Amino acid sequence: MDIQKTILNQVQEAKAAALKLALVSAKDKDAALKAMAKALWIHRAVILLANRKDVLAGKKAGLSSALIDRLMLNDKRVEAMVDGILDIAKLKDPVGELLQVYKRPNGLRIEKVRTPIGVVGIIYESRPNVTADCAALCLKSGNAAILKGGKEAIYSNKAIYRVLKLALAKTKVPVQALQLVEFTDRAAVTELLKMDAFVDLIVPRGGESLIRFVAENSLIPVVKHYKGVCHIYVSHKADLKKAEEICLNAKVQRPGTCNAMEKMLVDVKIAKKFLPLMIGRLREAGVEVRGDEATRRIVPDVKKATAQDWHEEYLDLILTVKVVRDVYEAVDHINAYGSRHSDAIVTKDKKEADAFLKGVDSACVYVNASTRFTDGYEFGLGAEVGISTDKLHVRGPMGLEGLTSYKYKIYGHGQVRS
């Protein structure tokens, strides 16, 4: 098939469908989401069969265990996809929300209201649940979605997409509002990024190389979801037992996610007490620990960290550790080496916590909690298109509101400008 012609046809269909979708009521959009959720559960056997083909291919290709985990679906994960769509259906429709209203001296009434962005292209890797999450979020917020998943999940994505389209055919949401680019060639991404006449926004989520490629080649505005080089700083004023549990959860619960801890910073005043216990627990969980010289003086068999380690998003059971003087050195290190995603401090001191919250330039900053909570579902957003590390127009988990813009409605009674 001709990639350029196929994608051009898809974006044209999506643009036309987006204009129709803007007129669909909240009630009808929610009915469509419920139909999508029901269809996913009914047809889960087909989806899981397709997913097995992807998993087998991934293992043959030598994907890490963490990446295979991101790729794999089972009944529980399909159920989570279903629940995610149903949760989105329960959320308030942002479209039409009145943001501001005021009356001018000449009698004009001006209303600022939320509107859909239009056509949103989402380019992503590995996790097939993204197909369902992003489809639901886009449709609920009145946007047509053009989805381009990675080749490692192609069978799963196609199966999920066809089930969702089947469900939409029986609703008032135009079927063409949901499109999947099925080409696995990078050339398909290049073509999509040229379609600025039809696509209003591109959201890439995946590895750093993918996001840089999209940002450098797109003619369409991009909201970047860069890598998650997430830090946790353990203060000398921390409850060390809580710190152990928080750090362990952040690293090992699902190491292949962008909100997993990749670097652990430890105050020098408690390093000798905390590090041997913490590193022991991490190693029991299968984590390879790398450290700076101060860490290695305390735990000598820790692997020496390289200069590149401080920038690295491992997405695996690997962690780099650094001993720091205080919260201010921790903040400086995070701002120098982090990715503006999610970072945390463990401390009992409010003043220290406030300094961290104000100083760290990241989308999500935590006090005494795991970075693993940076997630649309955990934030009460139903799901997210991704975690934006940009500052405009959305930051952090990008849910329904992040998929809207606004317009001004002006009501007059014959006014003319003099």
Image (cartoon, rainbow, N blue to C red):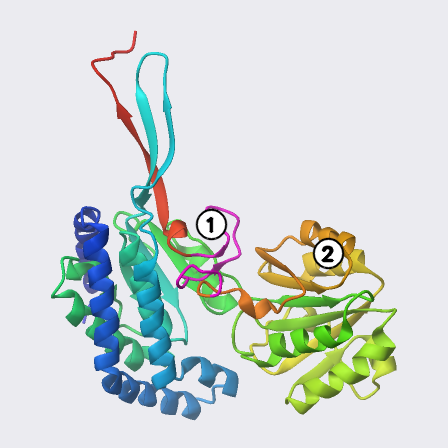
Quarter of the view holding residue 35:
bottom left
- Residue 394's label in the rendered image is 1
Which of the two residues, 189 or 410, is positioned nearer the viewer here?
Answer: 410
Which residue is the extreme one toward the top? 418
Give the CA separation, mark 2 to mark 1.
25 Å
- Residue 174's label in the rendered image is none
Q: Is residue 100 left or right of residue 374?
A: left
Q: Position of residue 338 (x, y in %)?
A: 64, 62
Residue in view at x 85 percent, y 63 percent: 325
- Residue 353's label in the rendered image is 2
Q: Is residue 56 visible?
A: yes
The reply to whether dot 2 and dot 1 touch (C-beta < 8 Å) is no
Q: Nearer the viewer, mark 2 or mark 1?
A: 2
Which of the two residues, 265 or 411, is positioned nearer the viewer here?
Answer: 411
Label 2: state its secondary structure.
helix
The residue type indicated by label 2 comes to Ala
